[in-house]
Amino acid sequence: MTEPDAPPAAPSGALPQRQVALIDLLDRLLSGGVVLSGDLVLSIADIDLVRISLRALIVSISAEHPSPWDAALRPTSDVHYPPSADDS
Amino acid sequence: MTDVSYVYGVARDRDGCLDEVVADVPGVADAAVHLVRSERRPDVAVAASAVPAADFNEAALRTHLEDLAWLESVARAHHRVIEALAARTTVMPLRLATVYLDDDRVRAVLDARLTAFDRRLADLDGLVEWGVKIYVDVTEAEEAPPEPPAGSGREYLRRRRAARHAHEDVYRAVEDVAARVDSAARGYAVERARHRAQQGQLLTGPGENVVNDAYLVPADHAEQFRSEVEGSARGLPGIRIDVTGPWAPYSFAAPPDSEPTPRSAGP
């Protein structure tokens, strides 16, 4: 990570195209990723949308990982604060 | 038809080559992908697509997100764009279905967070995510040569007890395995993120998922990481380790909130 000229993210071929399991992908896309509040959606930050709809399918949606980004970027006005989840 | 801007991730564009990288990748709703740049820092760019407002406004998303086929197609398209970027540079994925009114709004958000994005991209440079899942499959652990049907109540109880002990043994063993896996993984990883154990209809493979973690690992230690982690349950019936990746750093896109980030070598 110190060689400035090395290919940054990965050596060639390290991220080959492959069909990943949907459940693994949704773990990452619905509870990982940077949470910004968009203009149009209440933002999937409040995954409530998905959690309610697809609870049977996807229960890995994270109430435990709300959004560290919120704290990191608190001064900015349009950062979204997800409502605390009421998971049982 | 009105379009809105769907955003995928923030990427480092060191040499201005990323436009080409995203040009060939179909995005969500088969839309073309382009980069939105900050005027202040042309090397930090957001990958975006113009998508129909009618499908991505709040009401439409509420409906669409109940449709697993729609969710899957958007998730896979989002992932395709992130993978294409990750193959070339450092990328910080954004959460699924983040939508702005237009590219000017995207640029404004990028400008407002430029410092934080830049810092996190520097932290993530040269690192990839690996998923590590541990499964318990008690049926495998119980598998014994078939016995004749229990002839007596006592015999039946004996077998029930043996089965229960087998379960207990496996669950005890999996704790050791989890500790061993974590210790092996941390030999290489700079961060760990925990996902909730997987359940539900989308679950793949046999057994019960008991650990669903992600580790952020230097790309050049990928193979050692994988082989050490995979080796941690060798010879233990009923326990299975599934390593997935390498992934773009989805689970680490936001800085860790508890422990300080090891900021080894900034640029």
Image (tube, coloured by chain):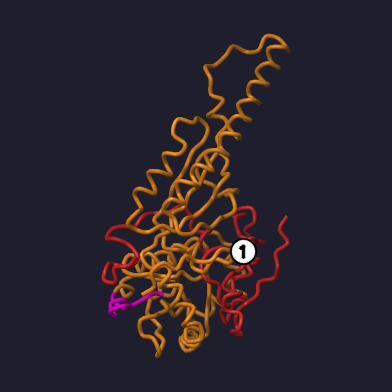
Instruction: Give the percent coordinates (x, y) of residue A35.
Output: 55, 72
Residue lying farthest top? Answer: B151
Residue lying at 64% horizontally and 56% vertically, measured from the top left: A55
Looking at the rendered structure, the kind of residue marked 1 is: Val
Chain coloured red here = A
**Chain drawn in orange:** B
Vertical placement of B58 versus B109: above or below?
above
Q: Residue at x 59, y 53 (%)?
A: B196
Q: How crowded is mark 1: few (under 14 residues within 10 Å), some or many (20 or more)?
A: many
Residue A24 place in picture, x, y as percent: 49, 54
Residue B103 spot, x, y in % from top left? 46, 86
Residue drawn at x 44%, y 47% as measured from the top left? B243
Relative to B83, does residue B146 appear above or below in the rendering?
above
Q: Can residue B3 be seen in this view?
A: no
Location of the N terminus of chain A by quadrant is bottom left
- Is A15 on the left or on the right of A53, as rendered? left
Q: Name the residue under label 1.
A: A50
